[in-house]
Amino acid sequence: MRRVLILILLAVFAVQGSAQDLAGYKKVVRDLSSARFQGRGYARDGANKAGKYLEKAYRKAGVDAVTRQHFTLDINTFAGDMKLSVDGRRMVPGTDFTVREFCPGVEGTYPVYYVDTLHYDSAKIFSDLEKPEYKDAFVVCDFWFTYKHREDFQKLQSADGAPNKGLILTWDEPLKFYKAYGEKVNPKPVIWVLSKQIPRGSRSVTVDIDNKFYKSYQCFNVIASVEGASHDSCYVFTAHYDHLGNLGRRVFYAGANDNASGTAALVTLAAYFAEHRPKYDMLFIAFSGEDANLRGSEYYAQHPVFPLEMIRYLINVDMIGDNNPVLYCETSDQGQRGFELIERINAEKGYFKSLNHGALAANSDHYPFAKRGIPCIFLEDEEGSAFPYYHTPLDNWRNAVFDSYEPVFKLIVDFIEQY
């Protein structure tokens, strides 16, 4: 009898262990953050290659159907030369400097002009930039200081606002690629540099930065479906699989946490519900274009496969590759009841120490649905040990963290069973 009981317990533990499929989850994260996909950006077709990989992963998971939803976007990219020297000292792209997403190409050696932030005088700045010694200068200033004088610095970025070549904005470590929106190219380059790498007194910068702007770049969302017993409504699970792509010829942003972690969860959730057939139909939508201003999810919201009003609840999973015991959430107004259920489940099961309910923002793919009145929630584990690597080349497989995957998975499964 004891032997039988042990065998039963081992079988139960085996089922519980396989339900989350941690090994399979890790494999998808590792694959998506590998050099094969070059940061899942656009210049080297990394995003579309990752989309094709996900099609295969979904089919292997046993879903009923996988389809592509094609759309286009305009995007600025940086997969060519990416060089910056300060007084002859070579900077490392992604570590010592990066560029803003709208940066044009630029090449040459230019003087630098430091903004006096203690005795700020905008009239003097514009007057100084007319002097021969500052012809085509890069204006250097602390990034946060520019926020206090936005109008002046907007002029310094415009084609006819001042005769400077561009802007160098200083930043403390770690240096982040701000966004990949890049839907246009501005007249002047804006480069972010670590404060310590361009100390006051530096005389010149030498730059060689290539950009390539793609007009109407072809992308696609990857949509997998699992049929339930009832077809009158559906649950939708979403995550974005695109990321920031390249910064020069050698550097890419792997995006293990952002958002290989959430995308991999979609694959394992699809496998779970393909095996444990749900009451209602389910869609697992891996979006492209999130880091290009939510373009994929906005396109889907405008061209839904299921009518939006048939969505019982939508769960968006983004950046769960961390170890903060407090899970961050956002909901639409209509999704509040779902959040209250998740709170009750978490209080009973103790998956996370607590849930932090933030204000709804246009920060991930739940937003196009939330603003259309769809019941939805956004799940993200932030501010853990992996968070400082966000939007840096160090968000890679070597620094990947998996603590939150299983509790997020279990929380979602429990929610679906009870909602």
Image: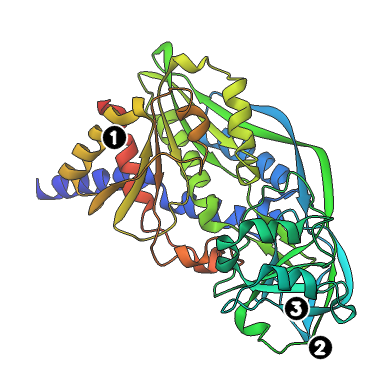
Q: Position of residue 305 (x, y in %)?
A: 58, 18
Q: Position of residue 209 (x, y in %)?
A: 83, 66
Q: Position of residue 128 (x, y in %)?
A: 79, 75
**What residue is shown at x 56% (from left), y 42% (from top)?**
240
Task: Please state if 42 lies on the left or on the right of 3 as rendered.
Answer: right
- For the residue pair 91 and 20, the one nearer the viewer reads as 91
One can see residue 66 in this view: no
Res 366 label: none
Mark 3 is surrounded, within 10 Å at the Cα level, by few (under 14), some (14 to 19) or many (20 or more) other residues, namely many
Marks counted in the figure total: 3
Amino acid carrying label 2: it is Gly
Mark 1 is surrounded, within 10 Å at the Cα level, by few (under 14), some (14 to 19) or many (20 or more) other residues, namely many
Task: Identify the residue under disc 3.
Answer: 113
Amino acid carrying label 3: it is Tyr
Task: Identify the residue under disc 1.
Answer: 339
Q: Decide: is 173 above or below 239.
A: below
Q: Decide: is 224 above or below 114.
A: above
One can see residue 39 in this view: yes
Does the CB distance between marks 2 and 1 fall below 8 Å?
A: no
Amino acid carrying label 1: it is Phe
Most extreme residue toward the top, as rendered? 232
Task: Identify the residue under disc 2.
Answer: 88
**What residue is shown at x 44% (from left), y 56% (from top)?**
321
**Dot 1 lies on which element?**
helix
Viewer-side label of 2, 3? 3
